[in-house]
Amino acid sequence: MSALVPTYARADLAFVKGEGVFLETADGEKYLDFGAGVAVASLGHAHPALVNALTQQAQTLWHTSNLYHIPGQERLGERLAQATFADQVFFTNSGAEAMECAIKMARKYHSETGAPERYRVITFEGAFHGRTLATIAAGGQAKHLDGFGPVVDGFDQIPLGDIEAVREAITDETAAIAIEPVLGEGGILTVPWSFLRDLRALADEKGILLIFDEIQTGIGRTGKLFAHEWADATPDIMAVAKGLGGGFPVGACLATSEAAQGMKAGTHGSTFGGNPLAMAVGNAVLDVVLEPGFIEHVQSMSVRLKQKLAQICDEHPDVIEEIRGEGLMIGLKCKAPNQKLIEALFEEHVLTVPAGDNVVRFLPPLIVEQEHIDMACERLSTACGQVSASAS
């Protein structure tokens, strides 16, 4: 019996090596990784720039704590601010921690500006913001809340895409609105870009803050550095993680100086957040992602992937109903049970990720090339044929 707490329904696979878009088992079997560790391995596996950055840093300094200045933090924070709407950055170890920081920051802002009664956050049905007690309350999904006692107060879920419902939900206690530009765990549901612009206008009108959860969508995943750039709508606060570390645990909460004004010395902290190892890797990721042509490559590969997937959808309408998503964050809405397609893809040595609404996620590393997309789609077509045959 394993000593691990059995909270994961793990596939019967273990990998010992990775290179580029491939993972390898101890037996030498290679799998095409179109899950990227749930959108984390943004530059694939064992990327030379990341290996070099981590190795060099590991040979000099691992940890000092935030009792002292950490030069890598200053550099990565400045680069993130220059590339976004933000003025200030707080570094965390994960996306859930980044969202916790965002929620606290929104509450603290209103306390600082004379309205401490404003603490509630409007969120949306189908959202996923993390696994802490506060973030599962923000997501509001029964399957995540069940058995964990009283739900943390302060969150109001409403239907996605209904701006009038948002307006009606705002009260004198509302501090912020929080939304994923593309709902990842919820089934790769792209929020209409006009809705994000409407939320920005409504937040300004009501004097509340707008939080974007770009934990999964950020760092080039959708074909922009951040997904909200497609909408030309900027938040006051943004949570990022996953692709920022390319596989090393790191997250960040980005904010305007106005939104962050309540976050003074002693109001928040993290022992490991922003440690030298994470900062070295985060800076190396940005070195690559911000190179001229990188984001354009993501867009180009996205077009090819969507075209190939649309053809497979037409050929196997009994298995795949719809193709969703932006950039290299693609969802296959299935007619057959999504787990059957995932298992058939395992047999073809392709790794994917399940999502809500009976969706299979394709989240390849952003360095994916045309031949990898063609290989994945050829194997997907075979897997669809297997699913169809098993159902007949």
Image (cartoon, rainbow, N blue to C red):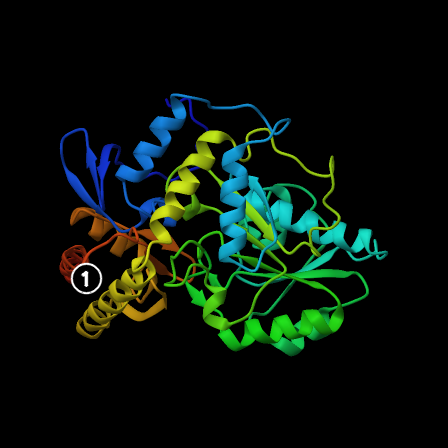
Residue at the farthest right position = 114
The quarter of the rendered structure image containing the N terminus is top left
Secondary structure of the residue carrying numbered label 1: helix
Q: Position of residue 291 (x, y in %)?
A: 33, 54
The local crowd at label 1, few if under 14, some if 14 to 19, many if 20 or more residues have their Cα within 10 Å, is many
Q: Viewer-proximal residue, 260 or 324?
A: 260
Q: Which picture quadrant has residue 119? A: bottom right
Q: Position of residue 145 (x, y in %)?
A: 59, 47
Q: Viewer-proximal residue, 386 or 234?
A: 234
Looking at the picture, does residue 249 appear above or below residue 123? above
- Is there any visible trace of residue 161 in the rendered image? no
Q: Position of residue 174 (x, y in %)?
A: 75, 62
The quarter of the rendered structure image containing the C terminus is bottom left
Number of numbered discs: 1
Q: Viewer-proximal residue, 375 or 169?
A: 375
Q: Which picture quadrant has residue 205? A: bottom right
Q: Viewer-proximal residue, 341 or 214?
A: 214
- Is there any visible trace of residue 55 in the rendered image? yes
Which amino acid type is marked by label 1?
Answer: Cys
Looking at the picture, does residue 135 appear above or below residue 373? above
Horizontal side of 223 relative to 131 (left or right) equals left
Looking at the picture, does residue 8 appear above or below residue 212? above
User: Which residue is the site of mark 1?
Assistant: 384
Q: Position of residue 383 (x, y in %)?
A: 17, 57
Q: Which picture quadrant has residue 273? A: top right
